[in-house]
Image (spheres, rainbow, N blue to C red):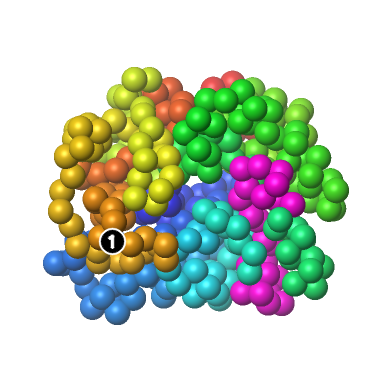
Amino acid sequence: MGVGISRHRLTGAVAAAGGMGTLAAQGLGGTSTLASRTARERDDPHGVDVLRTEVRAARDLAGDRGLVAVNVMVAITHYGDLVRSAVEGGAQAIVSGAGLPLDLPGLVGDADVALVPIVSSPRALFLICRHWQHFHGGRLPDAVVVEGPLAGGHLGFKREEIDAPESRLEALLPRVVEEARRWGDFPVIAAGGIWDHGDARRMLDLGAGAVQLGTRFVVTEECDADPYYKSLYLGLREQDITLVRTPVGLWARVVRTPLIERFERGEYPGFKCHYQCLATCVAHQVRYCIADHLLDAARGDPEGFFFVGANGHRCREILPVAELMRRLASGPG
């Protein structure tokens, strides 16, 4: 959901319903095609200024309810600028993964904002806590997200780990909860493959303090994605969801579209890098631009790159955010 899917409308609606809505910082500077970009987009290619505006709009929609968070990937170019922009816009929490956010406390300074790293192992949480305590005045996370291998999009697991029993969220969560308790009393948020109230209840019984969902919120009325994106989810079969290795060097769970099938056959288009959106990306070593295809998906182009969780084939209706939140909190559905 990191490019054009969770913007201020979805984020504000989730917060207004009492949750923590999470606005994605990635891709905000590339919301139109290169040829038709406005002067603002050309002057702000990484969306640093747009992010500030989006956060304020989400806060306005939320009123005094819930929390408005911003997800900023560690690997993204201008990571520090985006974190500071989110804080200036009024973000109440910064969620950060795709690498270890070791410098995050220094970027927010004394701002009253919760810091929420994303991890896929207790070892990663250990390294973050140790570094923050030593180099950032004893700071600890305010919460931590542990993401299992059934999540959509990029996964923090090697291919052989994705299907391993020890990588399942049910096995991973208690170990991360145990590590968190060694450092303090902050909640662990379980993510990756959670679908309904029963799944949420099961994670809470295993020690989670909260749960995080992505896929189900794509098929909400307030989701910022193009209607085509939502309709694609509604027609998915289980066999339409697959894993691919992306230019980021990670495995990702996506919808198998004709584009993905061409990639699986080794048919790649030529491209020019317009963004350098990831600091670690070396354009001439990869065979397509994932940023372009993610932006295409958000705009409803069938040639886009559609991230989806393992349970995406269960999407069958578009709901208002408030109704989905009610079902998740009280069940069934």
Q: Residue at x 15, y 48 (%)?
A: 269
Percent x, y of residue 203? 69, 30
The relative height of residue 239 versus residue 35 in the rendered view (above or below) is above
The correct choice, above or below, for 91 with respect to 297 in the image is below
Amino acid beneath label 1: Ala
x and y percentages locating residue 185 in the rendered image: 84, 50
Q: Is residue 332 left or right of residue 287?
A: right
Q: Give above or below for 208 relative to 12.
A: above
Q: From what the image shows, is residue 52 above or below residue 224?
A: below
The image shows residue 100 at horizontal and vertical percentages of: 60, 58
Q: Residue furthest front?
A: 285
Viewer can see residue 272: yes
* Label 1 Cα neighbours within 10 Å, binned few <14 / some 14-19 / many ≥20: some
Quadrant in which residue 127 is drawn = bottom right
- Which quadrant of the figure has residue 212? top right
Boundaries of the magenta span: 104-126
Image quarter where the C terminus lies is top right
Foreground residue, 36 or 123? 123
- Identify the image quadrant of residue 122: top right
Give the residue at x 61% y 61%. 101
Q: Residue at x 20, y 37 (%)?
A: 266
Kindly tell me whether residue 195 is visible in this rendering: no
SS for dot 1 = helix
Residue at image location 61% in from the left, 23% down from the top: 165
Most foreground residue, 284 or 242: 284
- The residue wearing badge 1 is 283
